[in-house]
Amino acid sequence: MQESLNTSDRERWYDRPWAALLFFTRLPLWRWHQPPRRCYQSVVEWWPLVGWLTAAVMAATLYYASLVLPYGVAILLAIAARMLLTGALHEDGLADFFDGFGGGGGDRQRTLDIMKDSHIGTYGVLALIVYVAMLFSLLHAMTPLTAALTILAADPFAKMLSAQLVMMLPYARNEQTSKAHVVYRRIDTRAGILLAIQGLTPIALYIYYYRDVLQWEWLIALPSLTMYFLYRLIWSRLRGYTGDCCGALFLLTELAVYLAVSIHFY
């Protein structure tokens, strides 16, 4: 029995990316394999890799739906497809983030309590409405092909940037009060290199493809500045990060990528 327990707890090379897919999507991969629990502490290190999948689903839905449906409908279907794939995990974080920071009144503990509450408030509803409206408008300003390629680049890149929060701030809660009961580990050098490869490869290919059209400095600078200012806000209010902060940071940073691209294609 002890030997069986040790074998099942042995970490394999694919356990950590598998855990990230289980954590950040609603794919029923647990039916085939359940990695050791400690692997969930490193899911952020593989977050951009999951972004390759979520971006592919969103981009393919947008492009191929636009061939047979009005472009606006295709964009809404693409947004819905990613939400279904992730279980609206990041959108939930965005709503909680704005509820907490909007209704917390500058009090750290009250902000954390509001963010932990499963109910959505006025700030959260308004944030989701404005976010979806901006996402729709920015994608609609591009052609279907450009929008699809931009999604493929923006999703992993924004997740790579947002993952830096784990290295820059301590966790704001303790493990017992975490909604997911998972505290991400600090990213070491090896994991940081893998993270950079996952996030920078798609955006580098995108910049090369549009090298004669886009100013790559804006494409990198605008989301990076967005990430930095949100980091400063989170530090000043919470002195640490939560999962909701990571989710909100990803969506807003990704939005900054679309904004930078739309400025050039408008």
Image (cartoon, helix red, strand yellow):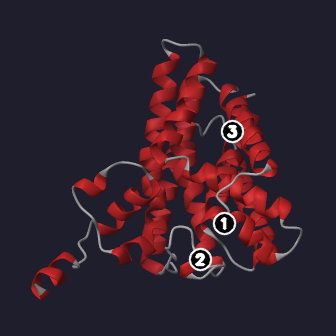
Q: Residue furthest right?
A: 105
- Say the numbered circle drawn on residue 116: 1
Q: Could you say whether the residue bearing mark 3 is in a helix, strand or loop?
A: helix
Decide if residue 220 is in sight here: no
Give the distance between the C-alpha atoms of the residues marked 2 and 1, in whole angstroms. 9 Å
Measured along the vertical axis of the image, is residue 188 above or below residue 101?
Answer: below
Q: Residue at position x 59%, y 52% from top?
A: 90
Q: Nearer the viewer, residue 197 or 140?
A: 140
Q: Could you say whether the residue bearing mark 2 is in a helix, strand or loop?
A: helix
Question: Label 2: how many residues lie within 10 Å, few (<14), some (14-19) or many (20+)?
Answer: few
Q: Of marks 2 and 1, which one's residue comes earlier in the chain?
A: 1
Q: Position of residue 126 (x, y in %)?
A: 79, 43
Give the distance between the C-alpha atoms of the residues marked 3 and 2, in whole angstroms. 39 Å
Q: Nearer the viewer, residue 79 or 89?
A: 89
Give the residue number, with chain letter if any, for mark 2: 177
Q: Quadrant of residue 212?
A: top right
Q: Amino acid at mark 3?
A: Val
Q: Amino acid at mark 2?
A: Thr
Decide if residue 214 is in sight here: yes
Q: Could you say whether the residue bearing mark 1 is in a helix, strand or loop?
A: helix
Labels 1 & 3 near each other (Cβ < 8 A): no
Q: Amino acid at mark 1?
A: Lys
Labels 2 & 1 near each other (Cβ < 8 A): yes
Q: Of marks 3 and 2, which one's residue comes earlier in the chain?
A: 2
Q: Position of residue 22 (x, y in %)?
A: 38, 58
Q: Of marks 1 and 3, which one's residue comes earlier in the chain?
A: 1
Give the residue number, with chain letter if any, for mark 3: 261
Measured along the vertical axis of the image, is residue 231 above or below residue 203?
Answer: below
Q: Position of residue 104 (x, y in %)?
A: 84, 67
- Say the numbered circle drawn on residue 32: none
